[in-house]
Image (cartoon, coloured by chain):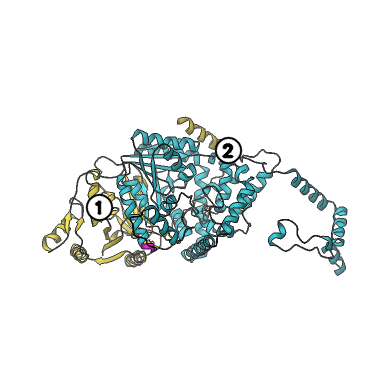
Chain colours: A yellow, B cyan
Amino acid sequence: MNKARDNILARLRARSTEIPPVELDRGFRSPDWNRQQRIELFCKAMTSVRTEIHRVRASDWADRLAQLVKERKLNNLLYAPNGPLARQIEAAWRNGEALPELVSRTAELDEWKEELFFGIDAAITSTRGGIAEVGALILWPTPQEPRSFSLVPPIHIAVVKADQLHNTFADAIADENWQAGMPTNAVLISGPSKSADIEQTLAYGVHGPVELIVLLIE
Amino acid sequence: MTQKAEFDQRVKQALDNPQLRRNFRVTMDGLMEKRDKAFPDKAFLEELRTIGANIRANALARQPELLEQLEANCTRNGIQVHWAETIEQANRIVLDIMERHHATRMIKGKSMVSEEMQMNHFLEAKGKSCVESDLGEYIIQLDNEAPSHIIAPAIHKSKQEVARLFKAKHPDIPYSEDIDTLTRSARQILRRKFHDAEIGLSGVNFAVAETGTLCLVENEGNGRLCTTVPPVHIAVTGIEKVVEKLADVPPLLKLLTRSATGQHITTYFNMISSPRKPGERDGPKEVHLVLLDNQRSRIYGDSELFDSLRCIRCGACMNHCPVYTRIGGHAYGPPIPGPIGSVIEPQKFGLENFGVLATASTLCGACGEACPVRIPLPKLLHRLRYEQVREDRTGATIGQGSQRSGKEALIWKLWSWIHATPLVYRSATRLASLFRNRIPNRIGPWSQVRTTPRIAPKSLHQLAREEGFKHE
Ligand code: SF4
């Protein structure tokens, strides 16, 4: 198909009139919000898209997690046994009683796809932070916490550190220099899956998670 | 039948359907209101529109280089890039990939380019199954229809119609008109399809040259599933979707979601830069990007029509269009309806086939004012009206001059001669005033929906003279 490529590029280059380059202002002006404002905005925006937010401390978030999944009477919770959250989750489970089964799978997805699709109630992942302005989580999935964790089970629980909240999406890209190397997949998540395709009426939980729960560590 | 007669027939059908008209009216009013609320600060909106227009214009100005850069970076990341001049080539590329994998089951995220390619039709004829997974697309696929809106494809259907359709196609699921229940039923039905699919197909909202990243905007999660679960992901896109830098994405995303549905951001914004890397445990092992031209490079050659390539497919121009709101998307014919469809589609399919769409506008200007990337849609509609009757045929548009009629041309020649010759003009107006009562009450299509104009007893010139104006 190289012929197609050459033909297309040749046609594009054959333009008779030169297009003057545009002086580009990408509108990059970060708001001057402080940490507290970022937290408030983030919580407000996320709540408005039906995300359940729990403001927690670094020392006790796992206990809150245990309580939440117990209240919901889940059968199991998928987590990453060698991920950044593992130590605290395992500790909370050692101390807790009658908690849902902790599920850890370290094989390739292909080997336990059926279970992930039809047997897992909830999954927990860490995040790379969030965006205050619009209320979104930033996830750069890793081999430990694969991308399907935040996507396939009906409940996704995400842990966000307040110190990693950015004002805007543009800030997140600029502050962390994303263009220097993008991961296999990066995703912004704002709320549970939803659709308005029938009569423009919002309905939740169409294909992705039905519920999104955020533990915000302040 | 002429294209005009066919179009008139489709319009009449739509206008005669009160349910359809209600659905569109209510939805478009809702979408306009949501957009308005999403931009409370109008000065900010105007500033953002300028930024968006400039980013897109800049990307187009450097399109050949950016496409090469995109290709180089994607390839370096492990994404296989394919080029297609025509939809036949693009379909063939997709088919070849499927055959190489002995795959028969494809799950699809929403992609207007795949509609343009009529991909489902093509692949199904080759024995492949293609399941649409976007809820709206799934609904219309069940009913064998085309989308009627680029963002809300099934908006012409009421929940009762959807309920009856689900019952007919899935008799084992209990009948319900409740939207939540219907949505959950779709989840249930499609879950297995995602699990079993061998190929996931998606469109692309922005392709970032700088990093070789494909960006996808969606709310349902079906787009993420299509691009994560099956072992092979194929993304199809028009060549115009390329942008220069990652930093170009946030302002465009802001404009796109707010203009489309009034959302500050969608549920998911998915950025894909490579297939599964060693050690990673999920994600497709192969990612393909199909770059489709299909006349875009031809449009690119015209320094005015070229602006239509800035489009980010938000749908705002149709939401704000008084014609679209009344006739809905199907009446237009080609995949993309509304003002932008009336500009782009005749250029792809030829003015001899769809030139009439350029007349499906009151030129009220609402589309141009709503467009987040400032595409001068009314001006372009006007230009296409000219293209189809132009005499010289030295332009780039397919089917130029095809609607030119000798009679009409003669009338206009006469008209301009009268207006340019004072003596003739004066006697013509005098004659018209004199015979003003002889003008019939019905003058063709004009008087079908309007009262026939009456010529005043005295011309403006005469009145002005009587009022004592010295200079005319
Ligand atoms: S032409 Fe403008 S308003 Fe219409 S879909 Fe494209 S970007 Fe949106």
Query: Is residue B281 part of the magenta span, yes or no?
Result: no
Chain ID at mark 1: A
Q: Which corner quadrant holds the N terminus of chain B? A: top right
Q: Residue A162, can we see it?
A: no
Pointers 2 and 1 within a single chain: yes
Does A78 sit above or below residue B208?
A: below
User: Observer-nearest residue: B31 or B269?
Assistant: B31
User: Observer-nearest residue: A191 or B169?
Assistant: B169
**Which element type, helix, strand or loop, lies under badge 1?**
helix
**Which element type, helix, strand or loop, lies under badge 2?**
loop
User: Position of B464 compared to B12: left or right?
Assistant: right
Q: Quadrant of residue B73?
A: top left
User: Position of B415 compared to B106: left or right?
Assistant: right
Q: Which residue is mark 2?
A: A15
**Residue range corresponding to the magenta coloring:** B173-180
* Crowding at mark 2 (Cα within 10 Å: few <14, some 14-19, many 20+): some
Q: Which residue is mark 1?
A: A118
User: Position of B354 compared to A49: left or right?
Assistant: right
Disc 1 marks which amino acid?
Phe
